[in-house]
Amino acid sequence: MNNPQTYDALVIGGGATGGGAALDLALRGLHVALVERADLTDGTSGRYHGLLHSGGRYAVRDPESARECIEENRILRRILPHAIEDTGGLFVATPDDDPAYADTWVAACRACGIETEEISIGQMLKAEPALNPASTRAFRVPDASCDSFDVLSALAAAVQALGGTVLTYHEVVGLHLADGRVVGATLRNRRTGEEQRIDAAVTINAAGAWAGQIAAMAGCPVTVRPNKGTMVAMAYRFVNTIINRCHLPGDGDILVPVGTVAVIGTTSVNVPDPNVTSTEAWEIERMLDEGEKLVPGFSQVRALRAWAGVRPLYEEGGSAQGREAKRTFAVLDHSQRDGVAGLVTVVGGKFTTYRLMAERAVDVACAQLGVTTACQTQEFVVPDVRTPSERPKPHHLGLRLAEVEEAAADRRTPPNALICECELVTRKDVERAVSAHPDVVAPWVLDDLRRDLRLGMGPCQGGFCGYRATGILHELGQVDAGQATAALADFAQRRWKGMQPLLWGQNLRQALLDEQIYRGILGLEK
Amino acid sequence: MTYTPELLEDIRRTADLCVKCNICTTACPVLPTTNLFPGPKYVGPQAQRFRDPTQPSPDHSLDYCSGCGVCTQVCPHGVKVMEINTAAKAEMRTERLRKTPLDPKLWRDTIFGYNEALGQVGGLVAPLTNFLMNFGPARMIAEKTLGIDHRAPLPRFHFRKFRGWFFGQHQREKAPTPPGAPKVAYFHGCATEHYEQSVGRAIVAVLEHNGFEVLLPEQNCCGLPMQSNGNFAGARRYANALLRKLAPYAGQGIPIVVGGTSCGLELKSDYREILGIHTAEARIVAEQVYDISEFLWLLHEGGRLKTDFRDQGGRYIPVHTSCHQKLHRIGRPALDLLGLVPGLTVEEMGIDCCGITGTYGYKHEKYDIAQQVGQPLFDKLRASGVDQAICDNETCRWNIARSSGLQVVHTMQVLAEAYGVAEG
Ligand SMILES: Cc1cc2nc3c(=O)[nH]c(=O)nc-3n(C[C@H](O)[C@H](O)[C@H](O)COP(=O)(O)OP(=O)(O)OC[C@H]3O[C@@H](n4cnc5c(N)ncnc54)[C@H](O)[C@@H]3O)c2cc1C
Ligand code: SF4
Ligand code: SF4
Ligand code: SF4
């Protein structure tokens, strides 16, 4: 093992909470390392529904979460404009929902400080013609959609810019204790198997659904209840506003336009192990059935990809499960709770409240270190790494097309071929991402580029861009033919996993065409 | 009535059917001629996923789509690429009008949309208009200010209008209509009214020869020029006005025949698919509209078409089936009909598009592209060694005539001649 590197603080978990904690620490002047066992957002953060909650969903049953959501919603719009699209949200009472619930809901929202505005069904249909015209009531709320890949890449870049270290594909396999204190961790490189040690004065455990496993490494019992939710991405945005059913939260009752797709979700299933992210046929069926209630014709749109994420539900001393469990979060100071200093666990919550969770956890960690600098993340606008600019532009759907179109219309710029046509990823984008990648020989390199660039996320699910990107990877010279082939096989296999539960209609045709390309023409075998 | 969800009625939804196979990319006639156009798959189903109705249109390259519809024809998955493009062009125009309201190209596109009014005004002072339109310096000015290419084929204006002939001289001179003759309504469109009476006269002659009573409904421009120049509001106004005029005929089950292939397509499908007019009028009119050749061929299949053609003595005429005619999806009834004429050989040239597609090739920045698209056709026609060709679409006819040097006529003109009913 190499000599240990020493940091003020170690953050475990490259999800929103960990990324947020690392930036918070760095902004308070601490030397920080963020470690993640896979790529950033590989956990729940990269599998979430994409909704920056207004809090409306929780107002009736969980007002504390609702309040946290609306406050953070306002802050995140300010500090991460480039990752957030101000789609606005609608709560809609479909014919399947009790119209009277809306009154309870409106009162609860008011109590939590969430603005709602009732609009007529005519106005609703004018804004969103695809919605069920038989709906009885509709309300506007300040929901937004938020791309977690964009958030995490910006957080990580900001941490690095402040002198911090971000290590992906490094798994924490053990914590080091000295005199009842956590003083560091052993990391294992996922590709090479090499181990290395990191020493840190304090460790923040932001491993989400895996937080119990990390805490256990220090002998602290933390029971996180993993709860799986399945989502289905429909191939295009037939709504441009976030649509919530106005009823008590249930399955498949939110439709989120994010990027180029509309995502319906979710289910809520307790699972024994947070690594379970397979989707089941009944879940897909339920999503389509519920979608049909919101948008007649829904199930005839191409379902592009299904996936699942695992909620890190946690209630100190509580036993509520699934949707009954609160969506608030907990910060566990293990020195007080378990007599283990140098370790703070932060778990539960929402993507929307990541910043607040990070702030609270870092407050505790700083108290242990005797650092008194105040949190700055409320004000710090996280720079956009993809298109850096003084005043980051809020994200909107047409932005990417506008960029590509403007570049093409400007005769001075050399032609820049599209590699991923569905998601408008250019050759230059791919080249830049490849050269920025820390470990291009890793077989999962294309999947990392996907999170960076949205490569392969469109209707053909990598059928055409996969091999083109592989060609560029090889052309740039750091990857030999064998490695390039392995990368392509890995990518195709992952895309296939998401398409497999949805093999009917147009997606089936697409899958067969992709299969012909990869197995028939290129001779890739499973 | 079964309820069709809004979602499924929208033509833009067909973008969802695209499997990215690139078949349309290889078929698009504009793509190979210029770097400025990224092709149907890109501007159609792909870009469509990025178009947010609440945001300004981000499109530029879409402008180079000619609207020929070859992409829609070849797509094996039912993506209505050309229709998607047309709808997106309307959004693009709205955005341009907002951003650069003084851009002369926008004025030009607006003017092209009003070709019916142009025909009316231009006709009043026909000699002057014709002089100016053939007068080099005037054309150069039009090119510099409005971007109307000085080489583009403009039609000749006439004082005398087709309707004037029909209700005047023709009613006086024609043979009396036999009692109980079946009725057919004729939509002649603006080109026939203002520039090409001879086409209308031939159609009337052929129909009357076959024992029909030809009715001439009140009519106005179908709105296609506005639609293809991105002015949907204007196009819808024209469309609804025309539907009101034609619906009473359709309602009585009187078939409506159309000579221009683009006008016919507009009435048959574009009103609903592109302009989103889903009224009862639009439906009943669409059900009664026939391309004139389609109508006559169906008549022939029912054994009711007269075949007393004169032998043409070994005449050969090359035919260009316009891109919009192919979009009717009715086969090639014009070729079938001409095939009935003894001693006449016709040959389909097999070229997708002549390049002009409505007003596209008139625009200075697109003239060269359009010429390149049509070049194989012009070459083939010239090589044929004959001096006459057939094409059933107005602007295509003028374009091919100008670029190949051949005289180009409508199928019905040849047929009328073969029946011996053409006027001198
Ligand atoms: C189906 C679903 C839909 C959701 N939708 C929404 C929504 O719309 N809006 C919203 O606000 N919230 C939503 N949530 C909740 C939200 O996604 C999560 O609360 C949030 O993403 C959790 O982030 P996190 O950083 O705490 O955990 P994670 O993102 O899971 O991060 C933990 C990371 O730790 C890493 N890790 C684990 N073990 C180790 C180890 N040994 N060494 C190193 N790293 C390790 C994991 O790989 C993982 O990346 C949703 C959740 C689910 C399941
Ligand atoms: S539009 Fe049709 S032809 Fe073109 S790529 Fe898509 S599926 Fe293929
Ligand atoms: S309509 Fe014609 S020019 Fe336009 S994309 Fe289709 S094939 Fe190409
Ligand atoms: S398509 Fe027909 S009716 Fe419409 S403008 Fe042309 S000639 Fe006139």
Image (spheres, coloured by chain):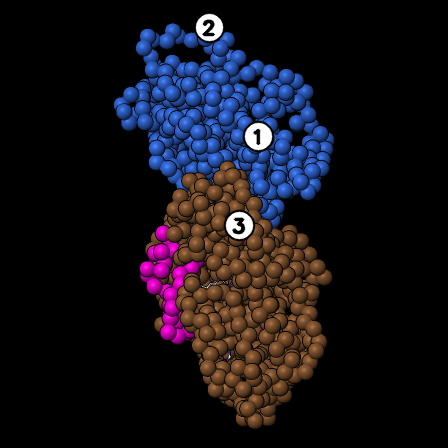
Magenta-drawn stretch contains A273: yes
Locate residue A133, reporting x and y percent. 44, 40
Q: Which chain is drawn using brown?
A: A
Residue A510: quadrant of the picture = bottom left
Of circles 3 and 1, the one toward us is: 3
Which chain contains the residue that carries disc 1? B
Please give left or right for residue A113 compared with residue B146 in the image: left
Residue at numbered disc 3:
A107
Please give left or right for residue A216 compared with residue A366 in the image: left
Q: Quadrant of the N terminus of chain B?
A: top left
Of circles 2 and 3, the one toward us is: 3
Magenta residues, start to end: A264-289
Q: Are marks 1 and 2 in contact (CB under 8 Å)?
A: no
Please give left or right for residue A502 compared with residue B398 in the image: left
Considering depth in this image, is A230 or B80 the residue closer to the camera?
A230
Residue at numbered disc 2:
B172
Shown colour of chain B? blue
Mark sitting on residue A160:
none
* Amino acid found under the numbered disc labelled 2: Arg
Residue at numbered disc 1:
B234
Which chain contains the residue that carries disc 3? A
Helix, strand or loop at disc 3? helix
Considering depth in this image, is B398 or A491 the residue closer to the camera?
A491
Q: Distance between the Cα atoms at labels 2 and 3?
A: 80 Å
